[in-house]
Image (cartoon, helix red, strand yellow):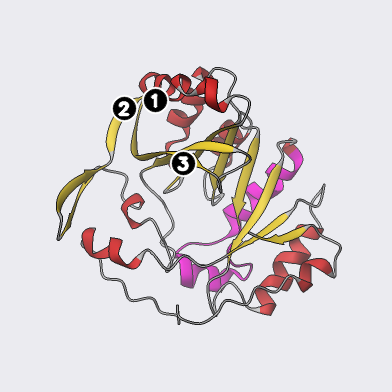
Amino acid sequence: MTGVVFDIREWTVHDGPGLRTTVFLKGCPLRCAWCHNPEGLSPAPQVLRSASGERLVGRTCTSAELASILNRQAPLLRDNGGVTFSGGEPLLQAAFVADTIRRLEGLHVALDTSGYAPEEDFRRVAGQSHLALFDLKLMDAQAHRRWTGLDNRPILRNLAVLAEMGTPFVIRVALIPGVTDTDENLRAIARHVCALPGRPPVELLPYNRAAGAKYAACGLEWRPPFDETAAPNANLQPFLDLNLNATLA
């Protein structure tokens, strides 16, 4: 079983509880206008070119090789954190991720996902995870297609699946100025989360403005169709009004 990984980042603290090693997998079906990992969009290894030279992003490895790397860190991670699979979209390589998880030695596993995947793939990986970090972007289907390129129905279907599975999860909302951070969208997300079994916690995440330079290296143009200089609307009130556990990350 082989997959393509574009980064293995150690000692991360925002990708789940405790200190973690985060594995970033290549490939994503969405094309979010604010994507901060453009090097993770293509499923294939690619050469990034910048003023400092060229570097290859993405390497093919087997699930056994990746698990071996992660298991070597187990003595440090087992009691203090764990491993997080992110991307790109890790569910685009669901079989590879699932086989890697199967080979891990007692490590806490978090899945950082947009939720956009076939239900079978979603169940396969989420069912082997101890925690899911589930990104919700836009509740309005038309707006979701406009800003991400795809419908949100598969995402909402998998969210409902997750809520019934028993795997603990956290809803994450990246606050994109004028796009995802509107009061209307936040209220819609709050209402949807309130209706889920267990009423999961919600984290509002600040907009990441560090992505622009990566686009040129990937041969892409960075022209965000929103005002990235605007202060995001970090409005917790829609969630507090419904007695939801919501925080600013």
The answer to whether the residue labelled 1 contacts the one labelled 2, judged by CB atoms less than 8 Å apart, is yes
**Which quadrant does the N terminus fall into?**
top left
Q: Earlier in the sequence, mark 3 or mark 2?
A: 2
Q: Earlier in the sequence, mark 1 or mark 3?
A: 1
Per the rendering, the mark at residue 61 is: 2
- Quarter where residue 152 is shown: bottom right
In the depicted structure, whether residue 171 falls above or below residue 131 = below
Point 59% across, 67% down: residue: 138
The answer to whether the residue labelled 1 contacts the one labelled 3, judged by CB atoms less than 8 Å apart, is no
Say what secondary structure mark 2 lies in.
strand
Whole-Å distance between the Cαs marked 3 and 2? 15 Å
Q: Which kind of residue does numbered mark 1 sit on? A: Leu
Q: Is residue 65 left or right of residue 86?
A: left
Whole-Å distance between the Cαs marked 1 and 3? 14 Å
Q: Position of residue 248 (x, y in %)?
A: 67, 63
Q: Which kind of residue does numbered mark 2 sit on? A: Cys
In the depicted structure, whether residue 245 falls above or below residue 2 = below
Q: Earlier in the sequence, mark 1 or mark 2?
A: 2
Q: Which kind of residue does numbered mark 3 sit on? A: Pro
Say what secondary structure mark 3 lies in.
helix
Residue marked by disc 1: 66
In the depicted structure, whether residue 46 falls above or below residue 240 = above
Q: Residues within 10 Å of mark 3 (few under 14, many from 20)?
A: many
Residue marked by disc 3: 90
Q: Which residues are magenta?
A: 136-164
Query: In the depicted view, which residue is nearer to us: 156 or 113?
Result: 113
Say what secondary structure mark 1 lies in.
helix
| Dominant secondary structure (helix, strand or loop) of the stretch shown in magenta | helix
